[in-house]
Each structure stands twice: as C-alpha cells, then as structure tokens.
Image: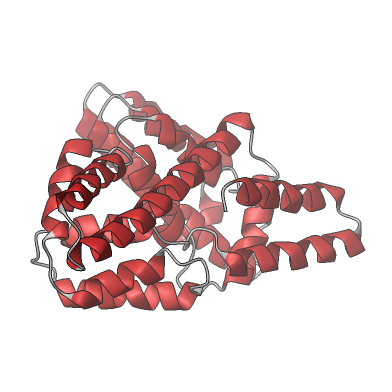
Amino acid sequence: ALCDRLLDYDENVRKQVVAVICDVACHSLSSIPVETAKLVAERLRDKSVLVKKYTLERLAEIYNLYCLRCCDGSLNPSEFDWIPGKILRCFYDKDFRSDTIESVLCETLFPTEFSIKDKVKHWVRVFSGFDKVEVKALEKILEQKQRLQQEMQRYLSLKQMHQDGEGPEIQKKVTYCLRIMSRLFADPAKAEENFQILDQLKDVNIWKILSSLIDPKTSFHQACSSRDDLFRILGEKHRLYDFLGTLSLKCSYLLFNKEHVKEFLLEAAIQKSSGNTQYIQSCMNVLVVKYVFP
C-alpha cells in the first residue's frame, strides 16, 4: 500500500514515501525487497524536480551503505549494482545534467573510506551490467570533462600571456574561452557570469590549484587536498564557493585517473586468473572508454 503512494498526485506525499522507504533501507538493507527499491528509483523520472532530486540523493545513500555492507559480508554482492546505472541515466534529464551526476559519482556514491581499489572492484561489477544508454551517459560525462580540461588549459595559458603584457587580442580569446567553458555547465549564462568574476580574482593560489587539478599526473589524494585548500581560501560565504566546487570537480580527474587505470588493469589480471570472462570484459570496456576520453 505504501508503494502505491509513490504515485500520489501530491509531490510532497511522493517525496515522503521515498523518504520512509529509504530510511527503512538505510536502517537495514535486507528489510526491503530489491523490487521496492526499484519502484523508488522510478521517481527519478518524476514530474516534480523536488522529488527527482531527493530520490537521486537517497539512492546514492543506499548504494553507499550497500558498498559498506558488501565489504563486511552481510549482503550478497550485486543486489544493488543497478543503482549507478539509474543515476547515470539522469544525465539525459535537463533537471540534472552532468554537473549533478558527476558530483554524485565522485562525492556520495562510494563511502569516503573506500580506496581506489575498492571503488574499482565495484565499478567492474556495475559496468558489467550497464546497457548502451548508461555507457553512453558515462562517455558523454567524460567527453565533457575532456573538453573542459582542454579549454581550461588553454584559458590558463592565455591568462598568463595577458598578464605578461600581451595585447587586447589575447583578452578577446580569453573571453571566447570562458564562453566555451560556460556551455559545458547546466546553466551556461550563470556559469559565464561566474567565470567573468573568477577571471578577476588575484589570488595566485587559486590559479595554482586549478592548474594542478587539470594535470593528469596529479594523484587522487593531491586533487582532494587541492580542492580542500581551494574551499579554505574562498570560505563558504564567497559568491564563487559553489561554482568553484563544481568547476574544480568537473576539470579534475577525480572520477577516473591514472590510479584507477592501474587498478582496472590489476583487477583484469585477477579476473583472468579466476576465469571470470564477464568481469574481464567489464575491465576492458571501462579501459576503452577511459582511453577514448583520457
């Protein structure tokens, strides 16, 4: 009867039902059938933005807890491996786009204490169950990241040239570059406005941090530390605090970096020795996607 209320005409009722079911699941994942969780996941396509975003948040929370329970052996692996695919599909929803989805994939989907090796083991299982739509969504996110990283590199080079006394032509190129990067955000007009404000900031540490984040040689922990430093420099009340949080994530390699690639290769070797062709193929598929969008 409670699941029936997921289709209630009142968005607040639908949100409350999602909350109750997810609260029960987070208390004890085995206390709700997987099919019930999948009914909740259908609210990712709710007509209400409020319900959609809340459902996304709670599903990521459930998957996070599921990862921990898999580690301690209290749950069968693969029971909730469909959740990341559902989250990736939200990329095609104009109310989410890549900004929100990448934030979930990087910051809330996995437990904070998870190592890159732990994450890779889960990604291998998850990726083996992705359909073409979900794979394409991941490819699109990585493609946008690549374009932003390239444009950010170009922008930082142009900015340095402008500081070195180059003429107004350089400033035109800077402005054009900011406009191109803005188009890779959910709200391009707002992003361009924020980029213009960012361009005026004088703190050299901010520019050093952004340069390090787009460097593929920067390690995962160095990137995390750099973002923490960036937030400390700005302070929560800074008008660019949220924007730079999104920008620093989107232009970083936190989703997949060289350390992830190394672990995927090691995992492929482990699966090969155990004869698990499904997971070997999964490792190879992830590596191909990463190779296309380095």
The one nearer the camera, 77 or 88, is: 88
Query: Is residue 25 found left or right of 266 in the rendered image?
Result: left
Q: Residue furthest top?
A: 9
Query: Is residue 88 found left or right of 270 in the rendered image?
Result: left
In the displayed structure, 258 sits above or below 61; it is below
List x then y, in percent, for residue 49: 25, 33
In the displayed structure, 73 sits above or below 158; it is below
Is any part of residue 56 visible from this angle? yes
Q: Quadrant of the N terminus?
A: top left
In the displayed structure, 272 sits above or below 94; it is below
Q: Quadrant of the C terminus?
A: bottom right
List x then y, in percent, for residue 102: 41, 50
Query: Is residue 150 found left or right of 188 in the rendered image?
Result: right
The residue lying at 20 percent from left, 34 percent from top is: 12
The one nearer the camera, 220 or 29, is: 220
The residue lying at 79 percent from left, 60 percent from top is: 268
Query: Is residue 12 found left or right of 106 in the rendered image?
Result: left
Q: Count the numbered circles shown.
A: 0
The residue lying at 68 percent from left, 68 percent from top is: 262
- Res 203 quadrant in image: bottom left
In the displayed structure, 147 sits above or below 89; it is below
- Res 121 quadrant in image: bottom right
List x then y, in percent, for residue 137: 51, 36
List x then y, in percent, for residue 279: 78, 52
The one nearer the camera, 146 or 162, is: 162
Is any part of residue 22 visible from this angle? no
The residue lying at 8 percent from left, 66 percent from top is: 237
